[in-house]
Amino acid sequence: MLVACTPVTLITRTSTPLPAPWSDENAVVSGICFESAFDAAGQTFIIRDAESHIQFYELADNSHLCRRAVTRIPFDFSGGRVLAGLWSKGIGCTAQHRVNSFERDEAAKKIVIMLQFETEGDCGYELLRPFWIGIPDAADYEIEFIVS
């Protein structure tokens, strides 16, 4: 379990309609240990099927950063659902992601999610925050995260 993780704060600022066109899936990756997630921070993961999801968990296990095998939590890929996400790390007292936009271009088959990662305070803690979402009808879309 990621001890340093708390639920992400989703704040829409621009073109993201409410309710959000995705589901919060941070719980699906909660079985990845802190050390492995910290090592993977900054990488984007786009997981389109159950086999790739298993390989994702095996990457964490094979990193040998976790003391025991990671807890594997299933995700429903039916209907073209995609599991996409990342971890962000920083130093401070608190940290959060803010969603600036979620843009889905049907013609180009592309989704761009713009996030802002913010840390606050002078605590000096190593912070790690997940941002993992389930996106419906996106199996054949290019998905990109832009984090500032």
Image (spheres, rainbow, N blue to C red):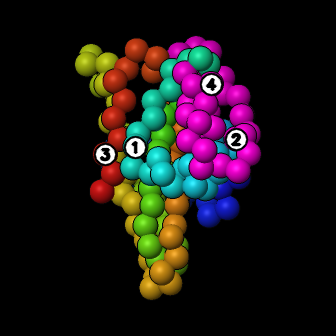
Q: Are marks 4 and 1 in contact (CB under 8 Å)?
A: no
> Label 3: few (<14), some or many (≥20) within 10 Å?
few
Residue at image location 61% in from the left, 31% down from the top: 58
Picture residue at 45% right of the left edge, 85% below the top:
122
**Residue holding disc 1:** 43
The CA span between labels 4 and 1 is: 18 Å
Q: Which residues are magenta?
A: 52-80
Comes first in the chain, label 4 or label 1: 1
Tell me the kind of residue under disc 4: Ile
> Pointers 1 and 2 in contact (CB under 8 A)?
no
Left or right of 124? Residue 101 is left
Q: Does residue 6 lie above or below 114 as drawn? A: below
* Amino acid type at image mark 1: Gln
* Residue most extreme to the left: 108
Task: Out of 109 and 2, give the one closest to the viewer.
Answer: 2
Q: CA distance from mark 3 to mark 4?
A: 25 Å
The nearer-to-camera label among 3 and 2 is: 2
- If you read the primary sequence from the N terminus, does the residue marked by circle 2 or circle 4 appear first? 4
Q: Please, what secondary structure does the residue beneath circle 2 have?
A: loop
Q: Which mark is residue 54?
A: 4
State the separation of the CA atoms marked 1 and 2.
19 Å
Q: Which residue carries the number 2 mark?
A: 70
Q: Position of residue 110 (x, y in %)?
A: 31, 25
Query: Dot 4 surroundings within 10 Å: few (below 14), some, or many (20 or more)?
Result: some
Q: Nearer the viewer, mark 3 or mark 1?
A: 1
The answer to whether 128 is drawn above or below residue 121 in the figure is above
Q: CA distance from mark 3 to mark 2?
A: 27 Å
In percent of the image, x 45 and y 61: which residue is there?
89
**Marks 1 and 2: which is nearer the front?**
2
User: Which badge, 3 or 4, is on the more N-terminal residue?
Assistant: 4
The amino acid sitting under disc 3 is Ile
Residue 124 at least partly seen: yes
